[in-house]
Image (cartoon, helix red, strand yellow):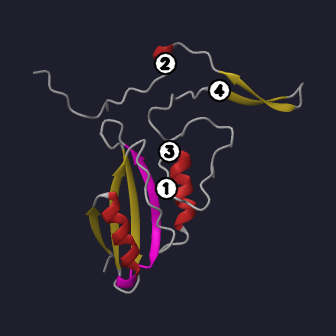
Amino acid sequence: MGIDLIPIRTTHFNCCAFLNCIPIQGFKFRSIFCGVDYPSRKRRFEVVYNLLSTRYNSRIRVQTSADEVTRISPVVSPFPSAGRWEREVWDMFGVSSINHPDLRRISTDYGFEGHPLRKDLPLSGYVEVRYDDPEKRVVSEPIEMTQEFRYFDFASPWEQRSDG
């Protein structure tokens, strides 16, 4: 018998209240916390929490959305390990948590500009970082490219388009 998955979509404030009381119901293991970027949406970032109940052999996926300026409430109190994942979502997407105890870069270099998993970041980035053997140090140089190769086309080639 497989594990049941119950998807739940909610506003962020309802999501945080829900996540604060859910350990009482047996969903004590937060198996994943991640972000997704949908640039065509008004609230472009999807924040996903997957919770597991070993007691009831079921999972809950709680999804909420945010934009560039909306800050999410941290869920560190019911799920202490979520602090690391909230840092990663901020580092990769730019979605920050209110009053997070340790919000700093976790996967990218401290000098990195932007958030690498956002789809509006140019595919080539803004600078090239390389080791210069004659100088015996790491150097950063701006990338020079024509603008037409710099930005990603958000239209999916797999979506059907009608011409009429």
Task: State the separation of the CA atoms marked 3 and 4.
Answer: 19 Å
Q: Which element carries disc 1, helix, strand or loop?
A: loop
Q: Which residue is mark 3?
A: 94
Task: State the separation of the CA atoms marked 1 and 2.
Answer: 33 Å
User: Callout 4 environment at 10 Å: few (<14), some (14 to 19), or many (20+)?
Assistant: some
Q: Is residue 15 magenta?
A: no
Are discs 1 and 3 less than 8 Å apart at CB? no
Residue 124 relative to residue 60: left or right: right
Task: State the separation of the CA atoms marked 1 and 3.
Answer: 10 Å
Which of marks 4 and 3 precedes in the sequence? 3
Identify which amino acid the numbered label 1 is placed on: Ser
Mark 1 vs mark 2, foreground winner is: 1
Are discs 3 and 4 less than 8 Å apart at CB? no
Q: Is residue 36 magenta?
A: yes
Identify which amino acid the numbered label 2 is placed on: Phe
Query: In the image, residue 122 lies at what x, y percent?
Result: 51, 28
Identify which amino acid the numbered label 4 is placed on: Val
Q: What secondary structure is the magenta-colored segment mainly?
A: strand
Mark 1 vs mark 3, foreground winner is: 1
User: Callout 2 environment at 10 Å: few (<14), some (14 to 19), or many (20+)?
Assistant: few
Q: Which residue is mark 4?
A: 127
Q: Which residue is mark 2?
A: 149
Looking at the rendering, the stretch of residues picked out in magenta corresponds to 24-37
Q: Which element carries disc 4, helix, strand or loop?
A: strand
Task: State the separation of the CA atoms marked 4 and 2.
Answer: 15 Å
Residue at 45% x, 56% y: name it.
34
Label placed on residue 97? 1
Which of marks 1 and 4 precedes in the sequence? 1
Which of marks 2 and 3 precedes in the sequence? 3
The answer to whether residue 162 shows anywhere in this view is yes
Task: State the separation of the CA atoms marked 3 and 2.
Answer: 24 Å
Query: In the image, residue 41 lies at what x, y percent?
Result: 30, 40
